[in-house]
Image (cartoon, rainbow, N blue to C red):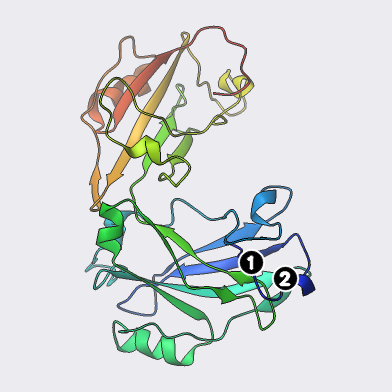
Amino acid sequence: HLMKGENDDNLKWPFRGTITVTLLNQLQPDIHHFCSIHFVYEVSPDSTIRVMKGRGAGRGTHTLISHNDLKYNEEKNSCYLKGDALHFRIDSVEVEPGDFHTDEEATPSAPPGPWLSASLSYQPPHIIRLSGFESKTRMNTEWYSAPFYSRFGGYKICLKAHANGIITVTLLNQLQPDNHHSYTIPPANEISANSTNRVMKGRGTGRGTPKLISHNDLKYNEEKNSCYLKGDALYFRIDSVEVEPGDFHTREEATPSAPPGPWLSALLSYQPPHMVMAKVHTCQCTHI
C-alpha cells in the first residue's frame, strides 16, 4: 500500500512501478516464495494515486503460499512459519522511469536463526517480521508493517498480509482434463468482512468474481478442444478450502446427475474434490 509521505510534493503521480516481495524460508537461503507487485494506473488507478490520508488501496496476490506449505517440510528443508512468525523481504522497488531502488536494512527483533540473522545484518534489502500469525489467523485480522521508503526521499509504502484461508474453484472443460478456468476467492477484507460471519438463516454474503469467463468462451472451441457449457449445464470443481489454523480440506465427492462424458464421469466418480453442476438458462449478463 502507498501511504501519505513526507516527500509526496516532490514525487511524480500516479505512482508507476514494481515492488518485489519474498517470503523467506527460515531454515536456509533457498526455496523462498516471491511475487512481483505491479502498480499500473490503467489497471488499478486507486492503488497508484497520491494518498492524502493514511493508506491507499493495495495491490498484491491472494495465493503466495498455502497454510499447509508454511509448515516444516523435511524433504525440502523448508519452514516459512517459525516461532509464530513470518519474515518478508522487500527485495526492490523499481520506479518509473526504471530506477532500481532498495531500502536501508532493518533488523526485526529476535532473528530466527544463524542464516537469517546474517541476512538481516548484512544484506541491503528491507526485512519485515510478521509476528503473532496464529492469533491473526484466528481473529481474521489483517496485519500492516511499519512504513518503509522506495529510496531516500522516495515513496512511503507499507506491506499488508492476511493470514486467513482461501477457496479455489475451477470451471471445468467438459471435453478433456485440460484448459479449465480456475479462480481463487481471496480472504475477506474490511469491505467484505460480513462474508465471514456466522450465518443464522439461509445464505451469507458471498465472495467471488463477476468475470470468470465470458459467455462467448463458454461455447465449443475446436482449436482448443474446449467446451464449458454442454447440455445446458456448467460443472464447477471446488478444488480446496484452506481453513485456519492451516489444515487443507476438500469436501467429500458428490456426483451430479447426467455427467456429460466419459472423462468427466470418471473424475466425478473417483477424484476427491467436490463437484457442482449448475443448470444454465437464458440471461442478459455478459459474464458469470
Q: Quadrant of the C terminus?
A: top right
- Is 143 or 170 nearer to us in this picture? 143
Residue 272 point in image, percent of width and height: 24, 33
Q: Is residue 187 left or right of residue 59?
A: left
> Which image quadrant for residue 78?
bottom left
> Mark 1 — residue?
4
Residue 32 x/y as whole percent: 41, 70
Q: Quadrant of the N terminus?
A: bottom right
The residue singled out by tag 2 in the image is: 8
Q: Which residue is situated farthest in the front direction here?
A: 53
Q: Name the element at disc 2.
A: helix
Contact between marks 2 and 1 (CB within 8 A): the answer is yes
* Circle 1 residues within 10 Å: few <14, some 14–19, many ≥20: some
Q: Compare residues 161 and 276 and report the one nearer the observer.
A: 161
Q: Please report the residue visible at 39 percent of the width from the left and 70 percent of the height from the top.
A: 31
Residue name at image x 62 percent, y 61 percent = 53
